[in-house]
Amino acid sequence: MSWIRKTAAEQADALAAGEVTSVELVQAHLDQIAATNGDLNAFLHVDVPGALAQAAASDERRSAGSPLHALDGVPIAIKDVLTTEGLPTTAGSRILEGWIPPYDGTVTARIKAAGLPILGKTNMDEFAMGSSTENSAYGPTRNPWDHDRIPGGSGGGSAAAVAAFQAPLAIGSDTGGSIRQPGAMTGTVGVKPTYGSVSRYGVIALANSLDQLGPVTRTVLDSALLHELIGGHDPKDSTSVPTPVTGLIEAAREGAKGDLSGLRVGVVKELQGDAWAPDVVERFEESVDILKKLGADVVEVSLPSFVHAMAAYYLILPAECSSNLAKFDAMRYGRRVTPEGSPSAEEVMKVSRDAGFGDEVKRRIIIGTYALSSGYYDAYYGQAQKIRTLIIEDFRRAFESVDVLVSPTAPTTAFPIGEKVDDPLSMYLQDLATIPANLAGVPGISVPSGTSREDGLPTGVQFLAPVLEDARLYRVGAALEAALLEQWGGPIVPAAYQSKESS
Amino acid sequence: MPELSRGEVRHLADLARIDLSDAELDHLAPQLNVILESVASIQGVAGDDVVPTSHPIPMTNVFREDVVVPCLTPEQALAAAPEREDDKFAVPRILGDEQ
C-alpha cells in the first residue's frame, strides 16, 4: 500500500519507526497532487520547494532524536483563508490575487512549530461564502467521487484534497458548516471546534462571531491529533477562550473500542422531514441503529428555535461580513483598479470592489448593509440576535437530557456543478443542519455514514456537543466510524482514487 | 415586507462602495429580494423579553501589557501596497471634484 493511502496517525508512526522519511511522504503527496490536481483544482497553490525543505529539516530533527511533535514530518494542506507568510493567500477572491501575507496566522505558526510540512493552499468559495466551492474566483473544485459534482463548501478544496489522498491532513474553516458539509460531500471527517478554542488570528474573517478553524481528515483519530495541535489559548485573539480543550486523542481512542454504554444521544426533531433526501435519511437511520447497538441511549429531542436558525444566520452573517470586508478598499493591499481620468479614492474603491468581488460576496455585503441600516436594524439584525439567544437556550435545555445531539450533516449528497449557483436560497439550504452550532458556539463533527443507494455518493452524520465538550464528539464519532469500517470492510474511497499507486 | 427597488439596491451598493453595473443590478436585485423574503419570517419571533446575543460565548475585553514587541518593518508592511511613496501608502485624491 502506498504511503498516501495511510492515515496521518499511521504516517506519524511510520516516521517514528524509521520506516519512511518525511521527504518520501511529502514527495508521494506532491506526486499525487501533480497527477490529480489538474482535474480536481483542490489546491490553488502548491509549495513544492518549501514543503520539501520543511520535510528535509524534519528528517534531520528525527535523526537527531528530537522531533518537535508526534506529527512532525506529516504533510498538511491549509485552506486559503489562513495567512501563511511567504505563500499566496487569496481567500478565493480576485481582490487578493497575488497577495503574499507578511505574517503567519497562529494556526499556521503552530503547524510550523510542530514541524508539519505545508503542501500548499486549498481552494474555497470566495471569502468562505458558499456551500459548493463554485464561488471561488479561481474555478470550482471538483468532487473526487464524481468530477461533475461539487465537493461542498466553502472548504471544498481541503475536503477534496484529503479525499483524493493529496494530503492526509488539512485545515478548514467553519462559519455555518464549511468544514462539516464538505466532509459529508466527500466522505471525509471534519470538525468545527468550540467557538474560541482555536485561534482566529490570521484568518481572513467572514463573520467574527461565527468563524472557527478546524481539522479536515480521513479519520476521527487524525482529526483529534490535529485538533489538539492547533487548539489552545492565543493572546493575539481577543475571543480566544482561556480554557484548553483536552482529552481529544484519548476520547477518539476510547471511542474506537466501540462501547457507548451510558451515552445519551438526542436525535434532533427539527432536522428531519421533507428537506432531507431519502437516501441521506436511510444512511442516517442506519448510523443511529449502530449507536444503539453500541449501547447508546437514543431519544428524540426538540430544539424548536432551530426553524429560525437559517434566517437569523443569513442576517447576522451578512451584517458581520459587510463590515469585515470594508477593509478591502484597494488602498493598502489587494487589487486596485483605477478608472480613467483623475478619480478620487472613493471612486477607486468602488470600481476596485466591483471588479474584485464575485456575485455572492456582493449579495451578502448588500444584504448586510441593508440589515444594519437605521430603520431596519431592530427588525432584522436585532431580531436575529434574539433568535441566537433562543437557539443557545434550546441547546442548553437539550444538553440537560442528552450528552450529544445527532443529525444528518447535509440534506442531500453532492449536487452537479452549476445546479444551484444562481439560486442562492437553495444553496443556503445545504447548511440547514450545520448553522445552529455556529450561532451557539458549540462544537460539531461530521463523520462519513456511507454512500447513497441512489447515486453512490457519500453521506455524513453530524454530532454536536456542549461548549468545550469537544471530546464527546471524538468518542461517539470514533465509535460509529469503527463500527461502520467493520461493516464496510475498510474506508469508503472514491472509485477513481482507489488503486492508483503513486509511491 | 418592503421589496427592494433597483434604486434602493444601487443606494445600498453605493453605501458599501461597490460600483454595480446596470447588468449586475438586473441580475442581483431580484435575488436579493428572494433572500430578504426568506429571512423576513424572523420578524416578531422573539419578544421584548428576549435578550439579544452578539456573541456565542460570554466575553470580557482583554488588554495586553503596554510593552514594545517586534512588528512588521516598513518594507514588509508596504510590500503589498498598490502604490507607495517613500515609506507611505500612496492613495488617489481624497477630496471630490466640488471640494
Image (cartoon, coloured by chain):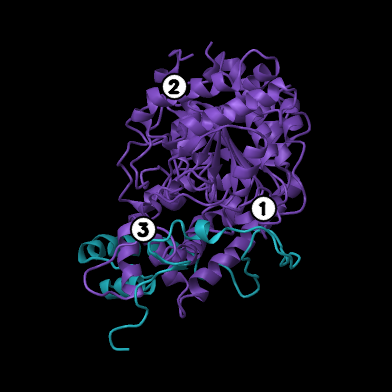
For the point 74% across and 21% down, the residue is A257
- Quick one: label 3 or label 1, which is nearer the N terminus? 1
- Please determine if labels 3 and 1 lie on a single subunit: yes
**Chain drawn purple, letter?**
A
The residue carrying mark 2 is A31
Query: Is B1 in front, or is A353?
Result: A353
Q: Is residue A83 above or below residue A407?
A: below
Q: Is residue A466 above or below residue A238?
A: above
Residue kind at label 2, given as amino acid type: Asp
Task: State which chain disc 1 sits on.
Answer: A
Q: Quick one: SS at disc 1?
A: loop
Query: Is A162 in front, or is A68?
Result: A68
Residue kind at label 3, given as amino acid type: Arg
The residue carrying mark 1 is A196
For the point 77% across and 50% down, the residue is A243
Which of the numbered marks, if any, corresponds to residue A335?
3
**Chain drawn cyan, letter?**
B
- Please determine if labels 1 and 2 lie on a single subunit: yes
**x%, y% of residue A346?**
35, 74
Query: Is A185 in front, or is A406?
Result: A185
Task: State which chain disc 3 sits on.
Answer: A
Q: Residues within 10 Å of mark 1 (few under 14, many from 20)?
A: many
- Position of A407 with respect to B43 (left or right) is right
Q: Quick one: SS at disc 3?
A: loop
Q: Quadrant of residue A288?
A: top right
- Please determine if labels 3 and 2 lie on a single subunit: yes
- Quick one: label 1 or label 2, which is nearer the N terminus? 2
User: Dividing the image into 4 quarters, which one contains the N terminus of chain B?
Assistant: bottom left
Task: State which chain disc 2 sits on.
Answer: A
Which of the numbered marks, if any, corresponds to residue A365?
none
Q: Is residue B48 above or below residue A131?
A: below
